[in-house]
Structures are given as structure tokens and as C-alpha cells.
Amino acid sequence: MTKLQTEQSAAKQYIEHVYAQLEQIYGHETEFLQAVEEIFLSLEPVFEQHPEYIEHNILQRIAEPDRVVSFRVAWQDDNNKTQVNRGYRVQYNNVMGPYKGGIRFHPSVNESIMKFLGFEQIFKNALTGQPIGGGKGGSNFNPKGKSDAEIMRFCQAFMTELYRHIGPDVDVPAGDIGVGAREIGYFWGQYKRLQGAYQPGVLTGKRPGYGGSLGRKEATGYGTVYFVEEMLKDIDQSFYNKTVVVSGSGNVAIYAIEKARHLGAKVVACSDSSGYIYDPEGISLRTLKEIKEVKGDRISTYVNYHPHATYTEGCKGIWTIPCHIALPCATQNEIDLESAQVLIDNGVKVVGEGANMPCSIEAINLFQNNGVLFGPAKAANAGGVAVSALEMAQNATGIFWSFDDVDAQLHKIMKDIYANAKGCAEKYGFPGNLVIGANIAGFTKVADGMIAEGVY
Ligand code: NDP
């Protein structure tokens, strides 16, 4: 066996050994193991070229969060009944900066989902080039159907425990599914009361005018479209005149739709967790915002405003609508092998992940094996956290930037992320594979930092 072959097998053996250990301990954490597997599969060429990462056991160290804080949240509902939920904060890795990642309120939240999101966040945040580490938090609290007062009491109870673990230089949470500017406002008020100090850099996603950054609301959706625009440029294409399907109708989806339309695309479908609408004339953004942002209503009501559109119960069918570009922007594991095949059969050319891990590993492989350009979440949806880092910078200086300034910086960051992921894919022998490129670009930055810091 040649020296190179020995090193190759050492890399593979090392990866398989670490994965097997994680599987043994965390076999029940399916989402976490899925995220780990997706990254580990990309890293073999890195370990072949950098045996020092094996010597320093970087993989095992990076896959174990620095700490997982799990806590009880007791709160009173409007009937004066005491309710109890579980809260989490996963502080994964702070080599690049303070732990940074959103808070999710959804009944599905558990430790596995927190860890999958926190693990991904390490590499995504490193890719942005901003000084932010990786973390994630949330609760199995279901905000649906709760009154504003109940949401406020829950957020205050959540922060009453969380505040001792976070700080502008320690850990900086933001929003995610079920947590928007309203919830961030309640968190912020409670943090300020408990801390007895005005430290706006402790949370991002605050309302503009109250410590927030202009452009944060738009950042993830716009960023995803900017990233896909770069992918399209590589095949001499653009959004102009393309048919686009976007899943979800929350923060990411609405602003992905807005930017895709700015660039001349026709977005014909979007969804919520109950079903999807199809409007062959192109979705009316004004109606969508009225339904979702003003009224907080269901997407099914769209057809009341536009009777020529159709509503279908169930989410999966959205991927049967023919499109050039698919932007899954709702939640994890929305596109499985079957949906990926239908998209391919219907001629999809580009898939860009606005949500976190919306495509299964099998679906991603199928896209790539069929020549569909694939933009992975940790690169394509990094715009939100990148602008969160810009919000932290504005909070630190007390100087606030215009929307156009923030948007221009976001655009540049997304172009840089694309160039970095593309360049790494080429450098390590996988041209065009942005999954591998993004994983390697994020991983090597953090791994180098971990080696520089020494073992702790
Ligand atoms: P929101 O809570 O604002 O919106 C989520 C949307 O997805 C809602 O329309 C929701 O519908 C819908 N949805 C939930 N489950 C399904 C499903 N199974 N099928 C179809 N639609 C569904 O969340 P965000 O837009 O903020 O986040 C969306 C995704 O983007 C998440 O994966 C999140 O982690 C990721 N992300 C968000 C960032 C941000 O800045 N907000 C940053 C980076 C990633 P319903 O109203 O019925 O629940």
C-alpha cells in the first residue's frame, strides 16, 4: 500500500470511528446524527490533506457541544393555570466568537433537533466571515393559538432561566421558527430587568428603532436568493422569467419570494404546515403579507382574495408543481427522495435551501447525480445570521446603518460565501459540489482555530 493510500484509509477509518462512537451514545438523536453524517461524509479529503486534524481529534471535539443547558419553563396561561415546558440552549462552539444561533418555539423541539441545528450553525457562522460561534436554543412550547399575553409570559419565564447563560460577549440568541421580533422584544425586556443593565448586543432580531438592524427581517430570504443568483450566473442564467416554487410562508419564505420577484421570477406556490397554494399568475406578495404578517392567518385564505388560485391540503404536493427553481424555506426534511424525483422529472434546474436541512441526504444525492445545482442551507441561508452579526456590530458602536448599506453588505457576504464554497469544492477535487465545498470551508476555519487554542 502506498503512503497516500495509507493516509486515505486513516482518514476514512478516523471518520467512521468517531461516527460509530456518536451513534452508540446518541443513537436515538436521529436529526443530530443526520446532520453529523452529512458533514462527516464531506470531510475525508480534508483529513487526507490535513492529518493534524486527526492528531488533534478535531472531529470528536467539534461534534460534542461545549454544553447543553436544559431547563424547566413554568408559566401561567390566561385561565391562571400553570403550564410547564422544556427549554434548551446548546452552546456548541465559540472558537470564532460568542455562541450565536436562534431560538425555536415548536412542539417538535427536543435535544436532538437543538443539537442538529447548533452543529450546523457552527459551520454556517464560520462561513459568513463574521466573528460568531455556533449555538441554538428553543422550547417545545407551541405558540399557535396562544394570546399575546401568554406569549409574553412564556418569553419572560424562558428568559428568567436563560439570562444567566447569555451575554453580548458570551452567547447571543436570535429568532427562528415561532420566534420573531415580538418574542425577541419580550426576551429583551426581561433580560434588561434581570441584568439591571442595557446590553442590546445580547440578542439580535430586535425591532429597528429598538436596537435592531434594518434589513434583518429580509436577510435570510434575500440572502438565499442572492446565493442562488450566483449559482445561476455560473450557468449563464438568472432569475428573470423563471418559475419558482417556495415552501413555507414565514419569515424566510416571504422575503425569498420578494427578492425572487424583484429579480424577475414568477413565484407560483407557497405553503404553511396545513397545505399549499398554487397561483399560476404568480403569488401576490401584498396578499401574502396581509395574510401572514398582518392577520396571522392560514395560507388557505389566499384563495378568498384570488379565486383563480387553488389551495391543496397537505404539504408534500407542492413539489409536484413544475418549476425551474425550488426554494424549500419551511422546515427540516420537507423534500425526500420521492419529492426530489418528481422535481427532477418536472425539469427543476436549481434547488436552494432557505430552511435548515429541508432536503434528506438521499434527496441531495439524487439532485447532484442528475445535474441539478444544489445550494446547501449552511451556505444559502447564512444571510440571516450574517446580518445578525451586523446588528451586533451596530449595537457595539451605537451607530445604525441604512437599509441599503445593510443590504449591500449582505449581498457581498453571500457572494463571498458562494465563492468560498465553490473554491473549496474545486480545491479538494469536487468541482461544483457546494455541499462538500461549504462543509470544508466552514470546518477548516473552525478546526484551525481549535488547534490554535489548544486542548481544553
Ligand atoms: P417561521 O416560523 O417564520 O415560518 C415557518 C413557516 O414554515 C410557516 O409558514 C410554517 O407554517 C411553515 N411550515 C412549518 N412546517 C411545515 C411543513 N411541514 N410544511 C410546510 N410548511 C411548514 O420560520 P422561519 O421562516 O424563520 O424559518 C423557516 C426555516 O428557515 C427554518 O428551518 C429555520 O430554522 C430556517 N432559518 C431561519 C432563519 C431566520 O432568519 N428566520 C435563519 C436561517 C434559517 P405554519 O404557520 O403552519 O406553522
Image: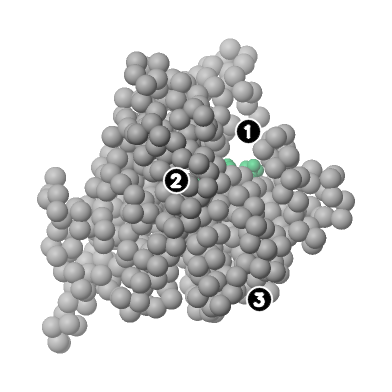
What's the amino acid at mark 1?
Lys
Does the residue tagged 2 have its C-beta within 8 Å of any atom of ligand 1? no
Q: Can residue 334 be seen in this view?
A: no
What's the distance in space between the residues labelled 2 and 1, CA to CA? 27 Å
**For this view, does 421 lie left or right of residue 230?**
left
Quarter in which the C terminus is drawn: top left
Mark 2 is on which residue type? Val
Residue located at (59% from left, 19% from top)? 149
The circle on residue 387 is: 2
Q: Residue at x 73, y 40 (%)?
A: 291
Is any atom of residue 393 visible in this view?
yes
Assess mark 1: CB under 8 A from ligand 1? yes
- N-term mark: 2 or 3: 3
Q: Which of 151 and 414 is in front in this view?
A: 414
Is 251 placed left or right of 48 in the picture? right
Q: Nearer the viewer, mark 2 or mark 1?
A: 2
Q: Which residue reaches farthest right?
A: 307
